[in-house]
Each structure stands twice: as C-alpha cells, then as structure tokens.
Amino acid sequence: MEGSLRSPREGPLVESLLPRPRLLLIAFLLVAALLLRVDGITRQSVASRELYGGLLARQYYFGEGEGLSPPKRRVVQELDRVFNPIEPPVLNLASAVGFHLTGGENLWLPRLFSALFWVIGGVFLYLIAVRLTTGAGALIALALYLFWPFGVWISRRGMPDAMMVALLLASALLVIRYWERPSLARLVAAGLVSSFAVVAKPGVALIFLVVLFVALALWNRAFRATLRNGRLPLFVVLASAVALAYYVYGTYVRDFLAGESESRLEPDLLGTGWFWKGWWSMIQTSLPFPQKQGFLALVPLAASLAGVALANPRTRAVLIGFWLGYFAFGLTFTYHIATHSYYSLPLIPILALSIGVLAGFVLERLKGAPIARGALVTFVALGVAAAGFKSQILLTSENPRRLVADYRRIGEVTGHTTHALVIDQLLVSPISYWGWIVANYWYEPTPGQDLPASGDPSPGIDPSQYSFLIVMDVGELQTERKLHAFTRDLPVVARTSDYAVFDLRGAAASR
C-alpha cells in the first residue's frame, strides 16, 4: 500500500515509473534543475572553499608547470606546501582532465560536475520517497530537493559536498532495500556503495548511514540479531574501509592530513553555548537562504516534524533514522557544524523527504475535495517556482570582477610571490588563485581587535619568513592598532582604497 516501505515484490521502481505523465514530470524537474544551475556557470568566483578545489585542480593540470612563466612555474611547484586535498580529490582530478579536453582552466567544469551530482542525487531521493509516501508526495519531495535555494547555490559550487549528498542518498536507498528483503548480497552492495559516500567527505556519511541502519534494525526487531550474525559490523567495516585507507595514507604515508581530524572533532565544544548558538545560526542561515529572516527556518522544520508524526510506523523509522543521523553528525563534527553553513547541506534531502510525506498524507485525505487538493498542489508549485526564480537571480547576480582584478594586480606587483602573508575576510584561496601566488593566512579582519593587546602581535606567525604582507581591508590598518604599528615603517609596494601590500624583506620586518 502507498505510504509504507513496499515489499520488493511490488517493484517500486517499475511501479513508480510506469505512468508516462509522472515520468515526464520527473524528467522535466531534473532537466529544469540542471538548466537552472548551468545559467551563469562561467561567472568568476571568490568563494574560498570552491577556489581551494580550483587550486588543487591547477596543480594536477599544470604538473611541474611546463610552458608557464618562471614565476608561475614556481607557484605551481609550491602550491602543495599550503593546499593539500582534505577529501579524496576526485572532483579536482576530473576537473584537471576536463581542463586538458577544453584547453585551459575553466572553473565551470567542477561546477558542472557538482550540479550533475546533485541532480543525479534527485533520482535516488525519488526512489526513496516512493517507498515512504504517495506518488504525489514523492514528486513534491523531489521538487523541494532540486529547487531549495540553499541546495541550488551550494550544488553550483565546485565542491565535493553535492557528490557526497548524492552518494549518501544512493547508499541510503540500498540500506532501505536491504531491510525490505535482507540478504548478504544486498548488504554487501549497500556497504560497498556506502564506502564511496563515506570517503567523499571522510566520515560524514558513515554517521548517517549507520544510524539509519540501526534505526531500521530496531524497527524490524533485529538489532541483536544483526550483531550476533555480524551483519551490522560487516556493514560498518565495508562502509568505512575506503575512508580509513585514505586517512592512513594521508596521515602516515604522505602526511597531508596530519591534524585534520583533530580540527574537526572537538567534543569539548558540546558544553559551550557558542556551539549550540552557532549550529542554530547555521541552520537559520541555510534553510531560509537567501532570505535573511532566520525565524523562517522554523517553517520547514515544523512541516518536517509534522511529516514524521503523521507517517506510518515503517516510514517514521526511516525518517527518524535520517534525523538522528543528522543530529549525531552535528554532535561529532562540532566545530564545522557551528561555523560552516554548508555542513548542514544534508538537511535539504531530509527536509524534502519529511515534507513530502506530509504532503502525501494531506493530498490523500483531500481526494474527495478536488478544489482544495488543486489549491494545495498549486501552492506548492508556486513555491517551487518562486524558489527557482530566487535561485536564478542569486546565481546570475554574483559579479566579483573588481575584486578579481585587485587580486590579479597584487599577483603582478608581488612578482607572483610564493611567500605572502594575507589578511582577508575571504581567507587565502581567492587571492592565491586569481593572483597566482602562494600565501599563508594570518587572521580574518573584524570590526573588533583581533591581535593581542600586548606581547607579540603575530603569535604563531614569523613575518621574517614571508616576502609580502597583503591587507585586503585598509580600514583594518586604522582599527587594529598593533597592525598599524607593525606596518608603520614597512615599505609600501601598492596601496589603494581597498588593499595595501607591504614589503617584508627589509630591516623593518626583521625588527
């Protein structure tokens, strides 16, 4: 029956795709979602996380820098001193191959790959949704997933997050299918696909998938049995094997992941108000995006909770598994969930599925009221259209050309240095990418005082090890007294109303 986890004998995939109008509507939603993301895809970017990936792709594309000018060749050869892959560089390597095929560094390639992953993830989400709700509810879940503005915005970035979400949904589908008809073959398939989801952003998907697996085991009253027969341990081992191998390689063989886990896993933050306020702030930022009113986040959260409450017991087990997975994920990756809005990206498919269940429940009960049913469908369609319209404006309005020009000019006046010290709200990736330099980060300028009031103005930073200091907010030179005193006697290489470049190679820097 609809609204439950169907028996495999009912063939949910075939059943859901047989009606031609529904198939056409699904295809229309997927194509429209991809076209929305392609619009303006060639625009320049100053997004730090995206350009971090761009710098990795640059390394793989140019190799030792043959054919480049000597300064740029030195930059390429030294990029790995600062920029190393945090996740397996699948997207970056694919982009480098694409650069060779298209004749140069084209940032639209990793963006296109990311957009394709998100849209493909919609297929897996729909196949999950038809197991949880009615056909109409599944379509609404798919539309929400594809056109949620925050999801549109992030999935157009050249970042691994969209790939991780798509693989997470594919793995979740296989976990659900395993519990429809448990078998060793289905368990191994779920574990192997999950291993790719887990390594896409090491460790993230593992939490979601293990919690979902356990939730369904509890619902089927088989949790102890899965421990006794080794099914749960086998799933965990299969799902985590590739990520564990990557961690060992990156930490003990190549040493580019040293300290990365410690910076993400900070359990002591759980006892601080900063963590809980930060987590809620990131949710308030992402769910209503691009709206600024944080209270609007309560609307989808309330609708999703209603969907969980109104679901039949088996569907509720799946939804609770997803929600508990997100909560456990936040309690594990404490620092990033409280400071990076895109770490809440998995919320989008969870909300879409939960609200889809609510919509399916309501529409089923409005079968005898065609006017009310039509009004609800129209309201949802208009909401999705409005979300797509807002997303289109957002994606095509970004125009950082002036800032990119500044970065390029700084690269020229510093001779494409490989020893720059940077103060910039956008961190270090944008200036490194557009300026063709290798830079380390000092601190992020804020209206307050960031440097210590006494003692060494640059703890942990030895300016004598750098050639140039680049300040991308000249107002910081006035509001930060320590910085003003530090730069007072330094030679000025370039200065505008937006940025200042100082020479650190002289006696003043040593003093």
Image (cartoon, rainbow, N blue to C red):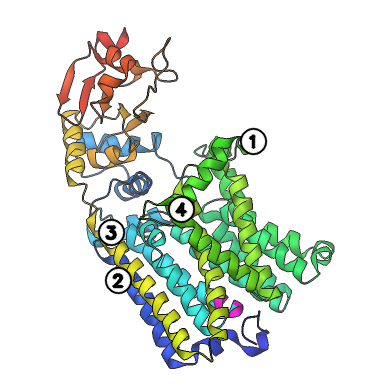
N-terminal of the pair, mark 3 or mark 2, is 2
Q: Say what amino acid the circle numbered 4 marks.
A: Phe
Residue 189 visible somewhere in the drawing: no
Task: Give the residue number, with chain letter if any, for mark 2.
Answer: 35
N-terminal of the pair, mark 3 or mark 1, is 1
Region of the chain picked out in magenta, as a range: 128-132
Task: Give the residue number, with chain letter if any, for mark 1.
Answer: 271
Task: Give the residue number, with chain letter if any, for mark 4.
Answer: 295
Q: From the image, state whether disc 4 or disc 2 is nearer to you.
A: 4
Q: Secondary structure at mark 4?
A: helix
User: What is the C-alpha distance between the residues marked 4 and 2?
Assistant: 31 Å
Graded by Cα atoms within 10 Å as few (under 14), some (14 to 19) or many (20 or more), the crowding at tag 1 reads few
Q: From the image, state whether disc 1 or disc 4 is nearer to you.
A: 4
Question: Which is more toward the observer, 228 or 208?
Answer: 208
Residue 112 circle label = none
Picture coordinates of residue 202 (x, y %)?
Answer: 55, 50
* Magenta stretch contains residue 129: yes
Q: Are marks 3 and 1 in contact (CB under 8 Å)?
A: no
